[in-house]
Image (spheres, rainbow, N blue to C red):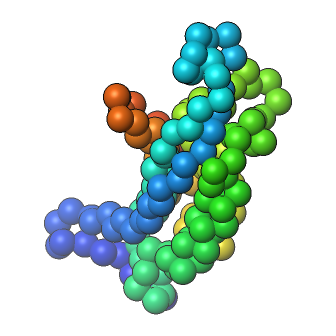
Amino acid sequence: MPFLTTTGVLPVTCEVGLSRSVRAFHIMPGLPGPEGQLHDHDYRIEIVVDREQLDDRGMVCDLDVLEAALTELTSQVEDRNLEEIRPAGARAVTVEVFARWVHDSLSPAVAAAGGDASPFSEGTVRTCRNGPVREKGATRHREDAA
């Protein structure tokens, strides 16, 4: 039987997560170089699952299942051109488009690991682009339960 984690007064939300770094290539059409030419970025992908009520094992979710999914996902884009995952209608794979792809790709793993089955209602994916000149903030995709 799942149990609620509380401090006696306020409920406590438990979080678990994983992160991976990956290098991938992309191009921003219509921009001058170097952004307008094929170039690489280092990205950090974080997946965080939270819940107030732990499962019957006393866990938020099975991290081994999430780790396998994250390893598989990063192997698909490591040292590859992100154009391979560009959705129809997107002009380019921006960090925001990449974050949405990561989110959509990992949602089934969250459910399989014991997280909420609705698309990440209890989880967050952050995809950050890290660079030597500047670092852009994390792009978060979190689906709120309807």
Quadrant for the C terminus, please: top right
Q: Is residue 20 above or below residue 35?
A: below
Q: Quadrant of residue 78?
A: bottom right
Residue at (27, 64) in percent of width and height:
11
| Residue beneath the point at 57% across and 16% down | 33
Q: Is residue 102 above or below residue 137?
A: below
Query: Is 8 left or right of 107, judged from the image as shown?
Result: left
* x then y, percent, for residue 19: 44, 61
Q: Is residue 107 above or below residue 69?
A: above
| Residue at image coords 61%, 74% | 68
Count the labels in the image. Answer: 0
From the top left corner, tell me how far across and down residue 65 is, in percent: 59, 77
Q: Quadrant of residue 136?
A: top left
Picture quadrant where residue 89 is located: top right
Q: Is residue 131 left or right of residue 72?
A: left
Q: Residue at x 40, y 36 (%)?
A: 131
Residue 92 picture location, percent across and down: 69, 25
The image shows residue 4 at horizontal and vertical percentages of 35, 76
